[in-house]
């Protein structure tokens, strides 16, 4: 038993060199006592125990009137240990390593004053039980927590109604508050007001299971909740009480806040791990980042950060409010109401999943991105706008070719936003599914492209009743899903909305296919020869739809510039009425065109002499994946009214794009401005192509070349010449495609030609071809005999399945004798041979 010093102005101050409670319960008597037959002193309202060494490892009970208990460690040790300690009949409990007012000052005014933490002072708690304590305060430069720290009471239902406090009760009664203050700080003991903060070199890690009606953590250091930690203010009912004749009703919740000195440059962020549970509110305020990796279940969640909020945990709350420089969500948020406002970007990416009844996302100077621009985790502070445009002559389509990001490749690319009502306001809104396929070597996509359905649907924004999107730059839906699921309203305010593929790439290929007839002769066999375009990289179509009314404009009535709605190789469908204001609507499909001729094999050499060939007839589902449809009335598309919208329908033609590409490349060298040595003198020469046109398979143009010279009077003049030119377009297409794989053979046209050249050199004399020639030229009174085999010359090839039909020319020397004379002559005749692709490639140089 400890009988403390008599109270002066309600405060009993007790100073020890060592104060240790271990192995036995300590009773602190707090009441009137007789000295010499008279009553001396009243019960203390506050009992101060100060010691150089302060170690608590058992129960401490105040006997008599309840009192506040202030345990202070001072001196060289600077450590207060509380291992499996517990407290009874204590109103307010404070554990601290700090300095405070002098004894005389306290006794004269009854005011402890400010508690100023000692440098490197440590309060180390490993399990603390104080049921019914109204406030537990832990104040030190360094605070260590472990085990259970519990202030709650337990109760059972009373038979006559209400509840009765019982140590073994089945119901949790939320009681008191746990308050942790860590760092180099000064705090007024009376009301826990922070009066001064200095730079601290430590960090605060909270571990253990903390349970009370309220939990507050304030630190001038980086605050970390350990993965094994649990902060819990949930209860079955809350306990009210009185303290110093004042009614006390706890405000249930968890409150975490970082503070700092103005000169501090260290990290003052908050890292949340473990579990946080509250029936009322969880409030986190950070002067740096908030890294949220915890499982949070609460009524109201408020996250406020001067820098970024990185949400990688699980959040379930009735209301979620976030304010930060940026928000990066890669995990689950489930809420009734979501309000997010940031200065820069909002990212819901790489596994981000938001579900809400009502959601408002607002970025003041940045983008709202659902999904990601690539498979790499990248979150730039400022984002470059994407070039939202359409090039009908390009072979590359989609933002994949405009994005160059690097870093860590994400294993999860999904991102979903689901809400009954959704409002987004930002510079740009991007809904991007970075899912794409590239055609493997020796694999054909002609019969269709096999895609992973779950990955094709892994990014979406789906709203039930009302969706309002506002973007000052653009809204992009790339290979993702964006839709209104019920009869409500879909409002879009933006200068440009693009519904497009994340990635589509076409390429020019050689086309060379043999079709065999039932006829045993080759006269009826056919070959399709020429060039074609194929899809070699693919992303699924974007899907933009509305079952409710669609309203589209940029929200600026004074702007005469038409806004754009582009549906490029994707699905856009409105099932209800659509309203457009000054909008240009473009629907662009994909057309993969084959450019080939059908000829008999006997004449194939003539057709292919200036042409090239490919393997098979292409038919890809990508061509059928474009839809623009309006199910209800459409208002605003009327060309007779200048203030209304226009509708344009077109296709991206792969073959036309290939022709443009090879023609542009071919004409480029004919544009020059250079100095040459002409007739022994250096002369300025300029050239350009003019009158460029395509007639059938021929590119025709005129080259104008001008030489600068000095006339007899010394003046500069030009002498120009006009030179008509023409070039076979199939030859250009074939030349460009010769080093690309033919069909799904695994070999290029260059390889087929090289192997065929070498192979025909090894062939012996074709007797049937020789006999046909002898028969053809032999006439009466003429003697024709074979003289010498000259050799074979490769001409063309064609492919039938896994077989190559090689066409070549056989040259022989014949001796001819007629009545008028005799002599030798060379004759060349077409011949052919079939060989498997695998065997042919053994002749590849």
Image: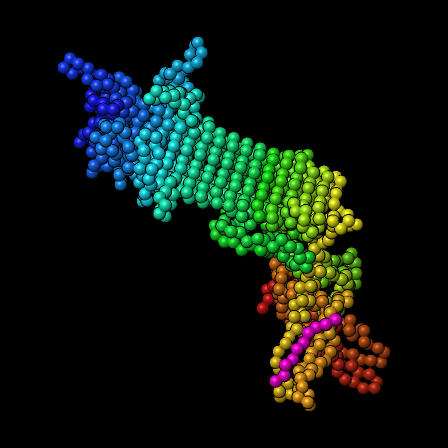
Is 754 placed above or below 63 here? Answer: below
Instruction: Give the quarter of the image for residue 54.
Output: top left
Q: Residue at x 26, y 39 (%)?
A: 118
Give the residue at the far front of this rendering. 108
Residue 631 position, x and y percent, is: 74, 40
Residue 546 position, x and y percent, is: 67, 39
Residue 328 position, x and y percent, is: 49, 43
Magenta residues? 682-691
Name the dominant secondary structure of the magenta segment.
Answer: strand
- Taking the magenta stretch, the answer to whether it contains residue 185 is no
Left or right: residue 434 compared with residue 780:
left
Q: Residue at x 73, y 43 (%)?
A: 629
Which residue is nearer to you in this view: 505 or 578? Answer: 578
Instruction: Give the quarter of the image for residue 169.
Output: top left
Work out whether residue 571 can be spotted: no
Q: Quadrant of the C terminus?
A: bottom right
Q: Residue at x 19, y 17 (%)?
A: 40
Query: What's the image's color scheme?
Result: rainbow
Residue 824 position, x and y percent, is: 75, 82
Left or right: residue 179 compared with residue 494:
left
Is 363 placed above or below 507 here? Answer: above
- Taking the magenta stretch, the answer to whether it contains residue 689 is yes
Is 397 placed above or below 574 here? Answer: below
Give the residue at the far left of this rendering. 36
Instruction: Give the quarter of the image for residue 756.
Output: bottom right
Work out whether residue 402 can be spotted: yes
Q: Quadrant of the N terminus?
A: top left
């Amino acid at each position: 038993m400890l009988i403390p010093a008599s109270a002066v102005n309600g405060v009993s101050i007790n100073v020890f060199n060592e104060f240790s409670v271990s192995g036995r319960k300590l009773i602190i008597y707090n009441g009137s006592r007789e000295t010499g037959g008279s009553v001396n002193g009243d019960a203390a309202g506050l009992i101060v125990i100060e010691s150089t060494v302060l170690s608590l490892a058992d129960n401490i009970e105040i006997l008599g009137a309840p009192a506040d208990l202030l345990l202070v460690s001072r001196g060289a040790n600077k450590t207060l240990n509380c291992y499996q300690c517990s407290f009874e009949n204590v109103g307010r409990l404070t554990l601290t390593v700090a300095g405070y007012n002098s004894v005389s000052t306290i006794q004269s005014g009854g005011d402890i004053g400010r508690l100023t933490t000692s440098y490197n002072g440590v309060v180390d708690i490993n399990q603390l039980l104080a049921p019914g304590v109204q406030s537990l305060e832990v104040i030190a430069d360094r605070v260590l927590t472990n085990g259970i720290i519990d202030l709650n009471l337990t109760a059972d239902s009373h038979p006559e109604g209400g509840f009765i406090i019982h140590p073994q009760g089945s119901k949790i009664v939320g009681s008191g508050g746990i308050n942790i203050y860590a760092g180099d700080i000064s705090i007024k003991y009376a009301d826990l007001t922070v009066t001064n903060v200095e730079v601290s070199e430590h960090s605060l890690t909270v571990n253990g299971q903390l349970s009370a009606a309220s939990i507050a953590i304030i630190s001038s250091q980086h605050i970390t909740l350990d993965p094994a930690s649990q902060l819990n203010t949930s209860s079955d009912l809350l306990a009210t009480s009185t303290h110093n004749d004042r009614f006390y009703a706890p405000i249930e919740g968890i409150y975490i806040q970082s503070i700092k000195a103005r000169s501090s440059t260290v990290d003052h962020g908050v890292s949340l791990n473990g579990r946080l549970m509250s029936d009322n509110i969880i409030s986190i305020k950070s002067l740096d980042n908030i890294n949220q990796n915890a499982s949070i279940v609460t009524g109201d969640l408020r996250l406020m950060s001067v820098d970024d909020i990185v949400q990688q945990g699980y959040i379930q709350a009735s209301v979620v409010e976030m304010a930060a420089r940026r928000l990066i969500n890669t995990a689950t948020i489930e809420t009734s109401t979501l309000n997010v406002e940031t200065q820069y970007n909002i990212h819901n990416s790489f596994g981000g999943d938001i579900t809400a009844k009502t959601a408002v996302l607002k970025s003041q100077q940045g983008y709202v991105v659902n999904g990601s621009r690539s498979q790499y985790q990248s979150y730039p502070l400022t984002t470059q706008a994407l070039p939202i445009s359409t090039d009908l002559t390009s072979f590359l389509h989609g933002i994949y070719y405009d994005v160059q990001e690097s870093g860590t490749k994400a294993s999860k690319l999904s991102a979903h936003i689901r809400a009954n009502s959704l409002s987004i306001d930002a510079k740009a809104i991007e809904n991007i599914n970075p899912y794409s396929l590239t055609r493997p070597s020796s694999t054909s996509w002609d019969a269709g492209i096999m895609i992973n359905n779950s990955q094709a649907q892994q990014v979406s924004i789906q709203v039930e009743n009302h969706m309002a999107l506002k973007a000052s730059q653009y809204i992009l839906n790339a290979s993702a899903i964006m839709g209104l699921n019920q009869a409500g309203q879909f409002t879009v305010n933006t200068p440009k909305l693009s519904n497009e593929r994340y990635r589509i790439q076409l390429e020019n290929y050689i086309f060379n296919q043999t079709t065999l007839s039932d006829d045993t002769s080759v006269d009826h066999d056919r070959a399709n020869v020429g060039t074609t375009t194929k899809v070699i990289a693919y992303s699924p179509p974007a899907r933009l739809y509305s079952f409710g009314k669609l309203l589209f404009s940029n929200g600026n009535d004074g702007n005469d510039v038409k806004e754009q709605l582009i549906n490029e190789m994707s699905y856009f469908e409105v099932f209800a009425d659509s309203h457009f204001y000054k909008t240009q609507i473009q629907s662009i499909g994909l057309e993969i065109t084959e450019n080939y001729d059908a000829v008999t094999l006997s004449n194939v050499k003539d057709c292919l002499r200036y042409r090239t060939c490919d393997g098979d007839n292409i038919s890809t589902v990508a061509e059928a994946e474009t839809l623009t449809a309006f199910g209800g009335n459409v208002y605003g598309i009327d060309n007779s009214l200048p203030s209304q919208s226009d509708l344009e329908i077109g296709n991206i033609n792969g073959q036309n794009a290939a022709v443009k590409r090879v023609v542009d490349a071919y004409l480029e060298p004919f544009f020059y401005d250079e100095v040459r040595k002409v007739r022994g003198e250096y002369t300025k020469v300029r050239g350009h192509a003019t009158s460029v046109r395509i007639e059938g398979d021929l590119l025709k143009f005129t080259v104008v070349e001008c030489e600068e010279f000095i006339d007899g009077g010394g003046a500069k003049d030009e002498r120009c010449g006009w030179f008509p030119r023409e070039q076979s377009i199939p030859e250009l297409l074939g030349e460009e495609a010769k080093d690309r794989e033919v069909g799904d053979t695994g070999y290029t046209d260059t390889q087929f030609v090289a192997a065929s050249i070498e192979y025909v050199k090894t062939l012996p004399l074709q007797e049937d071809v020789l006999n046909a020639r002898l028969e053809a030229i032999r006439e009466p009174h003429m003697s024709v005999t074979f003289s010498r085999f000259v050799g074979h010359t490769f001409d063309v090839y064609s492919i039938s399945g896994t077989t190559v039909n090689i066409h070549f020319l056989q040259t022989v020397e014949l001796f001819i004798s007629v009545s008028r004379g005799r002599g030798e002559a060379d004759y060349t005749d077409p011949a052919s041979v079939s060989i498997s692709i695998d065997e042919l490639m053994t002749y590849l140089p």
